[in-house]
Image (cartoon, rainbow, N blue to C red):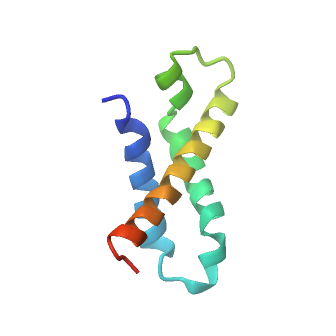
Amino acid sequence: MIWVAPFLFAVLNEAIIEYLLGNVQILRPYIPLLSLAIAILLVFAYQISLFSIFLGTPIINPFFDFLFSAFVVARLSNYLNDFVQKFLGSK
């Protein structure tokens, strides 16, 4: 059950991107950066520390821990988007 947190936030991040920016063609090249920005907002708002969850390490510097966790969530969100487009025929 430990893998649920990053997957849940990746799905939430992807849903926000698709609903808010999915149909805006001019923003298509910037979707990975916008995904990172939304992931940063989500991770800092919910204070999700993936490194603490998976590695069991104490949070020494919360800013960098949350920031790097946001990078992981944003990248998982991009992989999820690619998976859905390739295997489920979306878009």
The residue nearer to you, when weighing 27 against 82, is 82
- Which percent across, then down, holds residue 84? 38, 66
Apparent side of residue 9 relative to residue 32 in the rendered image (left or right):
left
Q: What residue is at 52 percent from the left and 59 percent from the top?
A: 78
Residue at the outermost front position: 87
Q: Is residue 89 above or below residue 56?
A: below
Where residue 57 sits in the image (x, y, percent)? 57, 15
Is residue 27 shown left or right of residue 10?
right
Marker count (numbered): 0
> Looking at the image, is 59 positioned above or below residue 37?
above
Q: Quadrant of the rendered structure where residue 24 is?
A: bottom right
Considering the image in quadrants, where does the N terminus appear? top left
Q: In this view, does 9 lie above or below 60?
A: below
Farthest bottom residue in view: 25
- In the rendered image, residue 65, in percent from the top left (x then y), is placed at 63, 30
Q: Is residue 30 above or below residue 12?
A: below
Q: Which residue is drawn at 35% across and 76% down?
A: 89
Residue 27 falls in which quadrant of the image? bottom right
Q: Residue at x 67, y 17 (%)?
A: 60
> Which residue lies at the image location 35% right of the left edge and 37% below the top edge?
4
Q: Quadrant of the C terminus?
A: bottom left
